[in-house]
């Protein structure tokens, strides 16, 4: 089979049919408001809020916490399950528990509920195991599954059923991108029907996966999308194309219209669909002036991600910015080497002296002979780093590169159970304020996705926060 070719972004965009002319957002907002819907997003790492603003983040999904959230909070809520750092079996059990508690909380408060599964826009994660758990929790075991990996801010688009990463005016098929080489969640296919077959080990055949085309979205609008969704068979799988926010908003309104007719699907999506389904429009980037950052201490940057993009960003940061670098050897980290205690003292001296400090694990990627062992090793490294940083002096701000590392630092180092996601500080890069229960209440915390940003984004961020 021939490889999927790379395409020029500008030329491809010009060749597509024009967008649907009517703005779907007013109708979506009216529906959400009139129904008093509570939108819950079960997120496989802390990055699902990367396109949203003024939404709640929870790292605690106990029934009492969820009941309070349903009762007192009208904003969409992202529950960070962190399942991308777990084995498939553990991820499934975790989502089972979350879905069960969410459904019970909704029944107790008698609140209309919408649950969406958020996954990686570059197709990494336990897509299918988690979706089955969500379906069971929503009492939709036989419902079709719809995949929507489109992510506008990150340059992830789906055209003719092929998922692309946009870089330097080029459409790179996702299966040829650096993210497809992930040690745990790697893949080779870019056409989503073939990707589904690959990730399900052939249990689902490519010709068993249908799609909602750009022609359907742009020429037929929400009604045509509704009709396509209503025609889906039980236990079927569908993928949706999208290139712009208007496309995914049309899909979202079509999904609402299908639900109104009693046709429900389980949705596993990237961040942009969630904004569309919640009726969230665009917002300006967050300006540092509103953050009221303390000026008597240094900022702290923690780099755990090992994607090639992160490595390039770290190299650029060390070359361009006035930061104190602290490299932590992974072997010493895993062996609880006493040298790490002195490293912590050095970090704290820097922060008290107002010196911005970047901590990074050695860039040598440690892998094993199986995906399960790779996950376990990554989790051990992230956990050890988080334990060391429990005693860190409160910095001016904290930037954490990588999903698993962000989760562990937030929950284990800073003991946060929740946060308010203010918006984006750079495109696709969210900014949080930690909750009052954390060890650093109100602190500015930036979970920086490992697959996001340009080469200079990390150094740009430090310049912005000066």
Image (tube, helix red, strand yellow):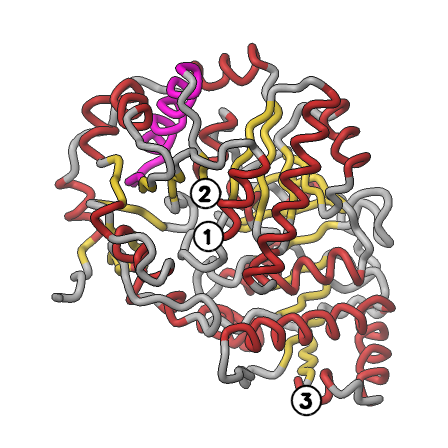
Residue at point 54%, 61% (across, down): 88
**Of the pair 55 and 163, the residue shown nearer to us:** 163
Residue at point 85%, 82% (across, down): 341
N-terminal-most mark, 1 or 2: 1
Place residue 232 in its image quadrant: top left
Report the magenta stretch's main SS. Answer: helix
Label 2 element class: strand
Q: In the rendered view of the protein, which quadrant contains the N terminus?
A: bottom left
Residue at point 21%, 22% (across, down): 220
**Of the pair 125 and 393, the residue shown nearer to us:** 125
Q: The magenta stretch spans which residues?
A: 240-261
Label 1 element class: helix
Place residue 251 in its image quadrant: top left
Indicate the position of residue 254 as horizontal and vertical percent values: 35, 23
Q: Is residue 251 magenta-colored?
A: yes
CA neighbours of label 1 inside 10 A, class few (<14), some (14 to 19), many (20+): many
Measured along the vertical axis of the image, is residue 355 above or below residue 10? below
Q: Which mark is residue 118?
A: none
Pointer 1 and pointer 2: residues touching (CB < 8 Å)?
Answer: yes
Q: Which mark is residue 268?
A: 2
Q: Which mark is residue 331?
A: 3
Q: Label 1: which residue?
A: 127
Q: In the rendered view of the protein, which quadrant contains the C terminus?
A: bottom right
């Amino acid at each position: 089979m021939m490889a999927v070719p790379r395409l020029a972004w500008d030329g491809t965009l010009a060749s597509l049919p024009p967008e649907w002319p009517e703005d779907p957002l007013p109708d979506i907002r009216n529906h959400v408001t009139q129904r008093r819907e509570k939108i819950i997003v079960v997120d496989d790492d802390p990055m699902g809020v990367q396109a949203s603003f003024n939404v709640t983040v929870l790292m605690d999904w106990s029934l009492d916490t969820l009941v309070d959230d349903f009762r007192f909070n009208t904003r969409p809520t992202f529950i960070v399950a962190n399942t991308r750092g777990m084995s498939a079996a553990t991820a499934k059990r975790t989502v089972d528990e979350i879905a069960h508690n969410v459904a019970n909380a909704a029944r107790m408060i008698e609140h209309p509920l919408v649950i969406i599964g958020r996954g990686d826009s570059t197709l990494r994660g336990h897509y299918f195991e988690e979706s089955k758990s969500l379906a069971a929790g929503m009492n939709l075991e036989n419902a079709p599954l719809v995949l929507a990996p489109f992510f506008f801010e990150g340059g992830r688009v789906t055209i003719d059923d092929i998922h692309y990463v946009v870089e330097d005016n080029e459409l790179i098929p996702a299966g040829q991108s650096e993210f497809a080489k992930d040690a745990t969640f790697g893949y080779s296919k870019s056409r989503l029907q073939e990707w589904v077959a690959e990730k399900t080990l052939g249990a689902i055949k490519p010709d068993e996966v249908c799609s909602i085309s750009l022609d359907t979205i742009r020429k037929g609008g929400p009604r045509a999308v509704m009709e396509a969704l209503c025609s889906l068979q039980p236990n079927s799988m569908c993928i949706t194309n999208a290139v712009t926010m208007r496309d995914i908003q049309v899909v979202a309104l079509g999904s609402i219209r299908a639900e109104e007719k009693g046709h429900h699907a389980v949705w596993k999506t990237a961040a942009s669909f969630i904004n569309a389904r919640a009726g969230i429009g665009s917002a300006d980037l967050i300006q540092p002036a509103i953050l009221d950052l303390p000026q008597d201490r240094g900022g702290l940057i923690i780099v755990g991600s090992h994607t090639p993009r992160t490595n390039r960003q770290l190299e650029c940061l060390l070359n361009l910015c006035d930061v104190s670098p602290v490299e932590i050897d992974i072997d010493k980290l895993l062996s609880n080497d006493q040298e790490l205690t002195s490293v912590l003292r050095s970090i704290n001296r820097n922060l008290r002296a107002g010196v911005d400090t970047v901590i990074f694990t050695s860039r040598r990627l440690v892998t094993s002979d199986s995906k399960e062992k790779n996950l376990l090793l990554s989790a051990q490294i992230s956990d050890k780093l988080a334990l060391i940083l429990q005693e860190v002096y409160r910095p001016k701000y904290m930037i954490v590169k990588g999903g698993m590392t962000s989760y562990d630092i937030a929950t284990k180092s800073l003991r946060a159970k929740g946060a308010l996601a203010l918006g984006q500080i750079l495109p696709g890069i969210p900014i949080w304020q930690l909750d009052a229960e954390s060890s650093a209440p109100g602190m500015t915390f930036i979970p920086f996705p490992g697959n996001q940003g340009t080469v200079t984004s990390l150094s740009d961020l430090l310049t912005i926060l000066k």
